[in-house]
Image (cartoon, rainbow, N blue to C red):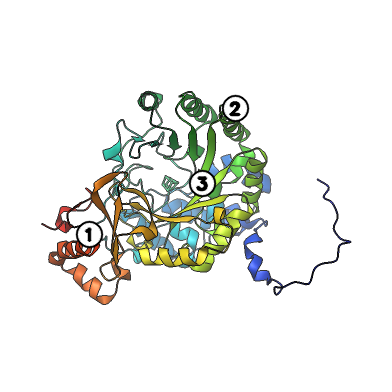
């Protein structure tokens, strides 16, 4: 497009210092053939690497796959650490060649992408006594398998149980991916009969206007299945908003460019929705600015040009994005490629990954610095998904927070006005006094009782996921 020239107009005297190059770091998107750093991909051409079928075929699904792909790039001791880490992990392994190629293999212990997808035994911490596998209590709010109806007007539909990658910190480690030595998964296979039961329930519930299609991951559904789900939901008159959720743009952006049928199907559903005055959008999940390359920009440009709105939901993860500058770069980089930063979640209280959680205080402090660095509509809301099914609470909205015991107390009157929802900071990040109290199980109910008393909410019942051993008598 030819833009009008303004070269002849004198530039007004600036009031601000010129920006440093580092202030624009978020626009530096890797456009190199970065995958050639991986020995097994040294001779892979751009055409091959940009094909989603190559990505799926060459994903690493075991420590042995990692060894075969990396050869001598990662030290033997690191790979042994991974093998031991996998024995204890609640999630199976699956890493796309795209993500594998973006990891700094000279420093894998501190790389934010390695940290998200590849467990190592040496950094593992004991689980907090309050951790559970289904911390959000989703199965208790399911009228039919794979449909969570907690909020008045919104549901979560889980059509499948596979993803293009498996994240160590997944909230649904109780269901997503293949069984591990630690966890036998709940079955959410993509079965049309199961889906139809969910649609029948939704058609019978006039209050539901909003459906999140998550999982599992929409990226892994063939286009005709995506169309089936989209059209069935669009056909229900009271459903006004449909969000397809996919980690795909963050871990395999080339699919948007190379799987034309899948992208066309999403674009068609957005257009059909628009014709019916309904919103169909894509929600995705970038956590680190390192996940965003020039391939991502090109993929997001295609969606933007074709009218698909994309929003992002990050998880705050220790060693991944809990640095203020990294989070600011992530927010700015997402905005730059037209992905709206929507939420940053406090890490859920899932088992087996306590070294990835941060304190509520960290979330509050990072939010304080992020707010004001860009436009308000591109500033994510920092939330705690209240353990036990309280839904999303603004991280600042606790009734009480004790940084020594690490207990924060939230209420969620729209879900249940008679309950309190508790979040517990990871024990290793507490001051000495707090760590010592958690070492003594007899102190646990007393700490919870103190937090409820300080909040003035001792008459309310803690959410059902708080283990009995922690509930005051
Ligand atoms: S992509 Fe989402 S659903 Fe899949 S493993 Fe990661 S966090 Fe879980």
Task: Give SS at disc 2.
Answer: helix
How far apart marks 2 and 3 lie (CA) works out to 24 Å
Placement of the N terminus among the 4 image quadrants:
top right
Q: Residue 85: x percent and y percent?
A: 35, 58
- Please indicate, yes or no, whether residue 105 appears anywhere in the rendered image: no
Could you classify mark 3 by the number of other residues whose Cα lies within 10 Å: few (under 14), some (14-19), or many (20 or more)? many
290 relative to 146 in the view: left or right: right
Q: Are marks 2 and 3 in contact (CB under 8 Å)?
A: no
The image's mark for residue 380 is none
Residue assigned mark 2:
275
Q: Residue at x 57, y 39 (%)?
A: 53
Residue assigned mark 3:
284
Question: Which sits in the foreground, 250 or 437?
Answer: 437
Task: Give SS at disc 1.
Answer: loop
442 relative to 171 in the view: left or right: left
Q: Are marks 3 and 1 in contact (CB under 8 Å)?
A: no
How far apart marks 2 and 1 lie (CA) works out to 51 Å
Q: Is residue 111 above or below residue 295?
A: below
Residue assigned mark 1:
129
Considering only order in the chain, which callout, 1 or 2, is on the residue closer to the N terminus? Answer: 1
Q: Residue at x 38, y 31 (%)?
A: 207
Could you classify mark 2 by the number of other residues whose Cα lies within 10 Å: few (under 14), some (14-19), or many (20 or more)? few
């Amino acid at each position: 497009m030819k833009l009008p020239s303004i070269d002849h107009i004198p530039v007004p005297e600036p009031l601000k210092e010129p920006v440093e190059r580092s202030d624009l770091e978020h626009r530096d998107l890797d456009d190199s053939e970065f995958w050639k750093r991986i020995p097994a991909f040294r001779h892979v051409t751009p055409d091959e690497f940009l094909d989603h079928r190559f990505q799926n075929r060459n994903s690493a699904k075991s420590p042995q796959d990692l060894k075969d792909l990396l050869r001598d790039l990662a030290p033997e001791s690191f790979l042994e650490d991974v093998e031991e880490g996998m024995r204890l992990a609640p999630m199976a392994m699956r890493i796309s060649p795209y993500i594998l190629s973006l990891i700094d293999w000279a420093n894998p212990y501190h790389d934010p992408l390695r940290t998200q997808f590849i467990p190592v035994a040496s950094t593992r911490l004991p689980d907090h006594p309050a951790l559970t596998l289904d911390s959000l209590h989703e199965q208790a709010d399911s009228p039919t398998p794979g449909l969570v109806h907690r909020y008045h007007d919104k549901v979560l539909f889980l059509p499948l149980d596979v993803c293009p990658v498996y994240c160590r910190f997944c909230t649904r480690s109780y269901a997503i991916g293949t069984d591990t030595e630690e966890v036998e998964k709940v079955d959410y296979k993509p079965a049309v009969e199961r889906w139809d039961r969910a649609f029948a329930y939704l058609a019978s519930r006039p209050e539901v206007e909003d459906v999140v299609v998550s999982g599992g991951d929409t990226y892994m559904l063939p286009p005709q299945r995506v169309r089936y789900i989209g059209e069935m939901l669009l056909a229900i008159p009271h459903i006004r908003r449909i969000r397809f959720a996919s980690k795909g743009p963050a871990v395999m952006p080339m699919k948007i460019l190379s799987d034309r049928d899948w992208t066309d199907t999403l674009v068609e559903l957005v257009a059909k929705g628009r014709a019916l005055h309904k919103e169909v959008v894509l929600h995705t999940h970038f956590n680190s600015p390192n996940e965003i390359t020039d391939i991502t920009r090109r993929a997001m440009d295609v969606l933007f040009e074709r009218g698909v709105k994309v929003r992002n939901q990050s998880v705050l993860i220790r060693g991944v994005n809990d640095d203020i500058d990294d989070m600011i770069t992530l927010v700015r980089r997402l905005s730059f490629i037209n992905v709206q930063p929507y939420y940053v979640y406090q890490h859920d209280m899932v088992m087996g990954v306590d070294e990835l959680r941060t304190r509520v205080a960290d979330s509050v402090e990072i939010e304080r610095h992020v707010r004001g660095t860009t436009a308000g509509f591109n500033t994510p809301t920092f939330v705690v998904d209240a353990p036990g099914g309280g839904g999303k609470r603004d991280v600042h909205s606790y009734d009480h927070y004790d940084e020594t015991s690490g207990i924060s107390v939230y209420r969620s009157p729209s879900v249940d006005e008679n309950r309190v929802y508790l979040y517990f900071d990871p024990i290793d990040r507490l001051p000495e006094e707090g760590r010592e109290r958690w070492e003594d199980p007899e102190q646990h109910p007393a700490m919870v009782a103190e937090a409820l008393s300080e909040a003035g909410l001792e008459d309310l019942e803690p959410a059902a996921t708080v283990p009995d051993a922690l509930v005051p008598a």
